[in-house]
Amino acid sequence: MNELFKFIDNSKTAYHTAENAADYLTKNGFIKLEESDSWNIVPGQKYFVVRDGSAVVAFVCGSEDGFNIVASHGDSPCFKIKYNPEINVENYCKLSMERYGGAINYSFLDTPLTIAGRVAIDDGDKLVCKTFISKKNFVIPSVAIHFNRSVNDGIKLNPQTDMCLLEGLNCIGGLEKELKEFADGNKIADWDLYAVSDQKPFDCGYGGNLFCSPRIDNLTSVYASIVALSAAKPKATAVAYIANDEEVGSITKQGAGSTFLYSVLKEINGSLNGNMRAALADSFMVSCDNAHALHPNHPELSDPTNKTLLGGGIAIKHHAGQNYTTDALSSAVIKNIFDRAGARYQDFFMRSDLPCGGTLGTTSSTQVSVRSVDIGIPQLAMHSCIETACKVDYKELVKGLKEFYSCRIKDKASDGIVIE
């Protein structure tokens, strides 16, 4: 858990997530590839490739056709800082921002935030992007109850007027000065910077089972996927796909709706002289994104007969409208694999009268059409600045994904599925 906590704390944005994942993979024997180069892929070897500094495909080349894929995403809801962001009110300096994803706005008030992302630097010869984390903490101050007596009756926050980051007092150009120092005298060409939580992960409550942290959705899935991949001994090619921009729809060159994953799979298959159609027919994807646990203060919001609990194991997510990719057969496959691993699991359904959020599985299927299941660990306060989950569920996820990567799933259509 300490390693997970470090990974989350250091992965402030999708750019840091990709960078830290790449560092982990390199330390565990994976070879970095470049999309623009020719690849010479050797069976049994470990590789990874990064797109846009924010999405990663890592794989261990198996000896048999087919792909066992775990897809997750490295971005989380937050607030993106606009260009020319400074607004001055009397002696205050504040930064104008816009929402990235569907954050719970009020959870970002009165809590330690920092500025992080990437900075594009022009050194005179080339443009280079570097990840950045400010050395400072910031806050978005709420309005005192004395000025808004009805605040506890409900609050509606305007992202333009209420969600401005307080830069400081009499500090015009503060962010610009820190960025110039970071660029070491080179020209700052542009940036993708965000206001993100700077709260460190922490244990919660008696018993030592719960933990709270920013970005539990979905960095727990990201880290579990690469930890399991590094430890697995696959027969088919095992793949960890860390996409970006899931929180804003995935339709970007580095998102799950892009050709990134498919092009890497096609290159692997071509290098091994395989049949792509046959390989995809014998492939299986685990869309790994977290699920909603039953809320202790609002149990009525959960499905009355499928109550997903913290500590109950991995959630297998179902939805009749296919917001999740799970069907009876893909659910049966993953349950079989989890049973082999001794990994506990439970089924998740939304209440029938509440809308269901989507994840990257259905989007990925538009590019890589393989049998798929949606899973994740249950959590509370999804999309809050600080979320809550259970340590045991994370450990069950690692155990289950390790077994999944090591299995060979042969889909014989009308003759059924064989799991070796």
Image: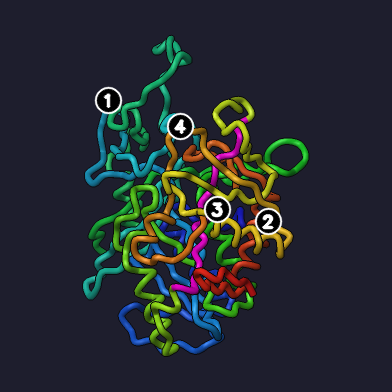
Which one is in front, 74 or 160?
74
Q: Which residue is mark 2?
A: 395
- Give the left or right position of residue 203, taking residue 161 as reference: right
Per the model, the C-alpha gap separating discs 2 and 4 is 30 Å
Circles 4, 1 touching at the beta carbon (< 8 Å)? no
- Give the left or right position of residue 296, taking residue 91 as reference: right
Type of the residue with mark 2: Lys
Q: Earlier in the sequence, mark 2 or mark 3?
A: 3
Q: Residues within 10 Å of mark 1 (few under 14, many from 20)?
A: few
What residue is shown at x 54% (from left), y 48% (from top)? Answer: 317
Callout 2: SS: helix
Q: Is residue 126 above or below residue 289?
A: below
**Of labels 1 and 3, the one closer to you:** 3
Asked whether residue 184 appears in the rendered view, the answer is no
Which image quarter: residue 122?
bottom left
What residue is shown at x 27% (from left), y 25% (from top)? Answer: 90
Residue range in magenta is 281-295
Q: Which residue is mark 1?
A: 90
